Amino acid sequence: MGTHVIEAGFPVNSDAEFEAVRDIASSTSTTTCGLARVVDDDIEAALDSGVEMVHTFVSTSDVQIEDSMHATRDEVVQRAVESVERVTEAGVTCMFSPMDATRTDEAFLIDVIEAVSEVGVDWINVPDTCGVATPSRFKAMIEKVCAHTDARVDVHTHDDFGLATANALAGIEAGADQAQVSVNSIGERAGNAAYEEFVMAVESLYQTDTGIDTTRITELSEVVAEKSDVPTPGNKPVVGDNAFSHESGIHAAGVIENADTFEPGVMTPEMVGAERRLVMGKHTGTHSVRERLEELGFEPTDEQVRAVTRRVKDYGAEKRRVTVDDLERFATEAGVERQQEEVRV
């Protein structure tokens, strides 16, 4: 699909994960990245896996330094610098993350960023590890980070308050070059910024070419949902079953006339490999019912359309899904005739 970087896993985590990262790195031309703490064994495992990029990270917020790492600020800076030096000496692209950046003392955050920048880090990743950023605050933080490093800047956002994609976009507006995203938002706790949302926002709202083959986004989402056994909610933006579905009579009538009336316009179902659907329920109007009946080969009169629409609304009001079979049954019971096939002699 043209995805720029695949962060394949945490090689030191287990033999199985090391092998998975190694296999991914050897089977794709896309840049592959391995994750590593600022620990020698982690760094070596990542380098041995054959990835082109190592993403090393260390906690920088006081609560994590003291109660998770049981270390000091000075030790954090020292370990960060030594890890970046080891990766760059190996000739591999180095990304560094000050973990929990959005809960880190700002002056100390800048100290860490300047320290790793001085030893040649290629990328600074700014993670909203606990999902507490807001777009305006995150944008200001990224602007400040960009002002204190010559490295390229990357952002990593979590969705605890439903702001992950918005924060990632705010980071890009502030000067970041890249965002870490995950298909279907899958990630720790409430998840990460969604691949499909971020890509389509950049493509459609910012009118910028990402290089991603967007027509395969729905296909990719379905594969991930199946393999991860994490179902995608129907109302999930871009890839949910309802993303391009219309039930409301007003919406359906407008879409039948011109899809731009009740769809974003700048993003069509075809762009993401999906299909527009007119679904039947208690909000369905006559335009939608007529359209579906004609698709099924019926030739309804105006009165018959109204009669079938009443049946659809009543059925939907009972919280039942109106299927094609139901619609055909309603049409038959209302005496709607099917179109006569042309007979050729």
Image (cartoon, rainbow, N blue to C red):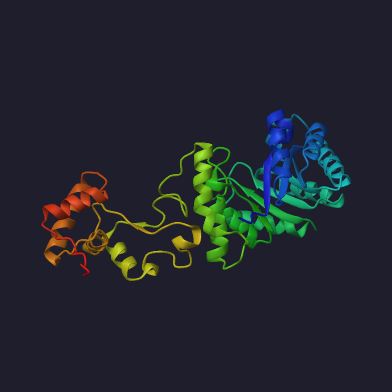
Residue 214 shows in the view: yes
Q: Residue at x 67, y 54 (%)?
A: 4
Which quarter shows the N terminus? bottom right
Q: State whether residue 45 is above or below residue 311.
A: above
Instruction: Name, please, the residue furthest toward the right.
Output: 89
Q: Tell how many labels.
A: 0
Which quarter shows the C terminus? bottom left
Q: Where is residue 315? Give x, y as percent.
A: 19, 47
Q: Residue at x 40, y 57 (%)?
A: 244
Residue 67 shows in the view: no
* Residue closest to the eye, 226 or 243: 226
* Residue closest to the eye, 343 or 243: 343
Q: Residue at x 65, y 43 (%)?
A: 103
Instruction: Name, please, the residue furthest toward the front.
Output: 345
Q: Where is residue 12? Give x, y as percent.
A: 74, 32
Q: Where is residue 144? Give x, y as percent.
A: 72, 57
Quadrant position of residue 214? bottom right
Q: Where is residue 41? Give x, y as percent.
A: 81, 31
* Residue closest to the eye, 246 or 21: 21
Q: In this view, does 309 lie to the left or right of 25?
A: left
